Image: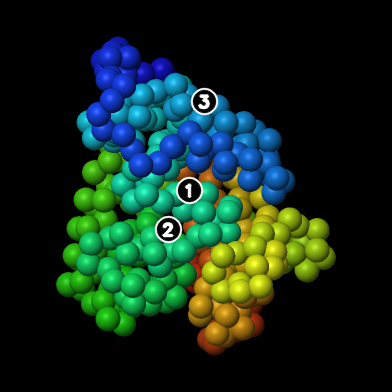
Amino acid sequence: MAPDAATATRLADAPASGVVPSRDYADRLREAADLLQAQGANPYRVATYRKAADAIAALDPAAIVDLVEREGVDGLDRLPHVGRGIATAIVEMLRTGHWGQLERLRGTCDPVQLFTVVPGLGHRLAERIHEELHVDTLEGLEHAAHDGRLENVPGVGPRRAAAIRASLHTLLVRDRGRNAPTLGAGPRPSVKLLLAIDRTYREQGAAGTLPTIAPARFNPTEEAWLPVLHCERDGWQFTAMFSNTAQAHQLNRTRDWVRIFFYDSENSEGQHTVVTETHGALAGKRVVRGRESECRAAGS
């Protein structure tokens, strides 16, 4: 969608000097496109990132910052070839200096470091939250802060969870604009579909037919051992990979816990983790963390 007249005028008149972001957003988008292509992702998804990179590269960096400050994701979403998901990614880069999706594609993702950008979250607590909740993104952390899971993490509690919610609101929510869906209200893949993606990933990974990357964490030999699946099902784009966390290594679950990231037509991102349940009625079965009741109902 084209920008409105006021936005177009502001972008055209933006000075060539002044506020300059510390990262080149267009280069990151192009790198993501290159990695997606090399890892066998849908060509349409690759082209979407390249078109967005070209659109962003044509703008003055100071104008991007100004647009985000004034209008948040909504302003970027109105730019040609950008869309809400990529607009959200640019805001993430601007606010945190990170883009989790690109770092996952590179094999350099460190969710614990990412969580420490949230005021009040030190490294130790960020690590505990990551290991307990199996979330890798700030959006995943935000969901956990609102649905009650975060306050049940040892060392958090209701008061600290409320403080983290407030910090995430300042960091993320204020940029989302009027068109953002209510937290947790947007569509998401069914547990049946997520479990099918999990099964496909583990089968193809075991067969050695998937591209692999060398994760930077917990990989002293720099071996390219981590298989990556990109696929499209039922209108969703998926990226799946095993969990490469300290806890997964300690519990010998690096070939069991599967992180599934999903993207809608606007490239907006969500995440779930699928594991083999170790106790209760679902013991021995594959379960989508956070959606256990749906798994029981589906008879997974």
C-beta proximity under 8 Å, tags 2 and 1: yes
Query: In the rendered structure, which amino acid carries the disc numbered 1?
Result: Glu
Gap in angstroms between the C-alphas marked 3 and 2 = 26 Å
Closer to the eye: label 2 or 1: 2
Point out the image quarter for the N terminus.
Answer: top left
25 vs 194: above or below: above
User: Residue 88 at what x, y percent from top left?
Assistant: 39, 41
Residue 47 in which image quadrant:
top right
Q: Is residue 157 left or right of residue 185?
A: left
Looking at marks 3 and 2 on the same chain, the residue that comes earlier in the sequence is marked by 3
160 vs 16: above or below: below
Residue at the location (66% across, 73% down)?
221
Please tell me the numbered disc located at residue 137.
2
The residue identified by callout 1 is: 269
**143 or 241, which is in the foreground?**
241
Point out the image quarter for the C terminus.
Answer: bottom right
Gap in angstroms between the C-alphas marked 1 and 3 = 21 Å
C-beta proximity under 8 Å, tags 1 and 3: no
Gap in angstroms between the C-alphas marked 2 and 1 = 9 Å
Residue at the location (51% across, 36% down)?
27
Query: In the rendered structure, which amino acid carries the disc numbered 2?
Result: Thr
47 vs 247: above or below: above
Report if residue 288 is visible in the image: no
The residue identified by callout 3 is: 54
Query: In the rendered structure, which amino acid carries the disc numbered 3?
Result: Asp
